[in-house]
Amino acid sequence: MQEIWDGFVRAVDLIITRNPQVVEITARSLYISIASTILAAVICVPLGGLIELHSFRSKKILVNLIQTLYSLPTVTVGLIVFLLISRSGPLGSLGLLFSPWGMIFGQAILVSPIMIGLTVTALAAVSPQIKDTAKSLGATETQIIATVINEARPAVAAAVLLGFGRALSEVGVAMMIGGNIRGYTRVLTTSIALETSMGNLELSMALGIILISISLVVNLLLNRVQGR
Amino acid sequence: MARMILRMLLPVLALAALCFAAVAVDEARLKLATTTSLQDTGLLDLIKEKFDEKYNVSLDVVSGGTGIAIQYGERGDVDALLVHDKERELKFIKDGHGLERRCIAYNYFYIVGPKADPAGIKDMNASQAFAAIMNKGKSSSDTVRFVSRGDNSGTHSREKQLWKKAGFNYSQVNSSGPWYIDAGQGMGATLNLANEKQGYTLTDMSTFMAYQGNLTLVPLIEGGSDLLNVYVAMAVNPAKHPGVNCTLASRFINFLVSDEGQDLIAGYGKEKFGRALFSPARGNCTLIGCPDGECAAPTSASCAAA
């Protein structure tokens, strides 16, 4: 118990004194997960719209598959992305491994299922009349998708924010793709793993508390957009 | 409608651009895969500071066991390696992945264990000690245990060699009972585990010194040629892996073997731990079994791609 309390005190201290290393790691954590969330959202939200607005034979299977991938182990994604972007892999010439770019790419893949799946669910809740009205007014398919997404804005935003939460808190991709390089790819979660293995439990706890605080803010935001 | 979507997207895109710009600033980077001991003791932080400043580059250190470090090298994912497993180093070079070995530093492995030394290994040599731990462990696994790295690292390799030298087959040792604990973790975590279980383990001296404050284990066997631990730098061969930065890798290795680099290594730890954690290779080539050409000498291989 004492260690948790000490960690809490230390966390407050690190935040108040704006410890440069902690600030840097926190900022890096944020921009890498924000970038990966945006990258994923730009692709997944429209894709979710496409899936929802079309009926095809294997749609149910596809949606089930996507939902199964919600719980994709982060280390498995890390491994697959590692093999993809390693210099010996198919995307090796891009030199993405052990860089923030690679982490953004990997985390975007990691959060894609959750974003697509939740977008599909969100759009399914939109009244079919809206879709029909748009159609009867001569809207193109892109316009219909845009209308429906707009209609389900809070739920779609929730899908995106949940993706962000997963990107921010995962450690598998960050460790395997980023390599935990100090000052370059070291983020909150990989720092926690490292400091713990080095026996600096108090600092680990402090970093963990910072991570939880960010999650709390994201969660409050989530509740707000959902109008609760 | 479309305009509205665009208006919603604009701030998002601006934010995205900002994020990408933040990571886009890319200076010259040297990717180095290293064994955990050099990183966890803080030596590489010091070397990075000096090297970065001198050459205006960024040394990116990816730390893992020797096993994974060599994997990264074989895939061309890093430019240089710092490892400590002679057999695998020679194979790495023979397979064409690496240019040449350069011994840069050494110290010794320790066999550490509980102060009471329930297996009575003090004053034995390393392989006798291993045999004694195994015998006692098999008959009383609640008091005598051995914790293994079990992670394919250089230290794990050495442990296997010592079992072999003691006359045992490693796969049999590994599965011969609860006295043998396969940690599957880095040196620091393994030391913490051995401490919790009050077991014996094989550790490099530097990590032990760095973690000693949290441990009740004591070194029982130190020194001896069986426990010699030589750190070697290698550049990845650009002829085999065209993406690697061989020029920068050679510059780094030359920095390590230069007087400046060797002095950094020789002095490291004196302030914090009361003694140096590593000895420089310079001047000790015969002792550490490195041929003259491979020992603390500047690189000679060409960086020309195929």
Image (cartoon, coloured by chain):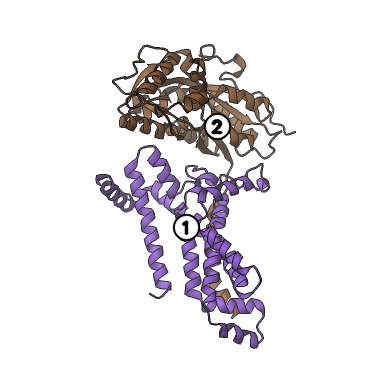
User: Looking at the picture, how far across and down is residue B101, in whole percent?
Assistant: 60, 23
Q: Which mark is residue A166?
A: 1
Q: Secondary structure at mark 1?
A: helix
Q: Which chain is brown?
A: B
Residue B278 location, quadrant: top left
Q: Is residue A220 left or right of residue B85?
A: left
Residue B275 shows in the view: no
Q: Is residue A175 left or right of residue A134?
A: left
Residue farthest toward the front in the current orientation of the protein: B139
Residue A138 location, quadrant: bottom right
Residue occupying the point 58% across, 54% down:
A105
Residue occupying the point 38% across, 67% down:
A220
Q: Which chain is purple?
A: A
Which residue type does callout 1 highlight? Arg
Q: The numbered mark 2 sits on a residue in which chain?
A: B
Q: Which mark is residue B67?
A: 2
Is disc 1 in the same subunit as disc 2?
Answer: no
User: Looking at the picture, how far across and down is residue A214, in whole percent?
Assistant: 39, 58
User: Looking at the picture, how far across and down is residue B106, in whole percent?
Assistant: 48, 20
Nearest the camera: B290 or B259?
B290
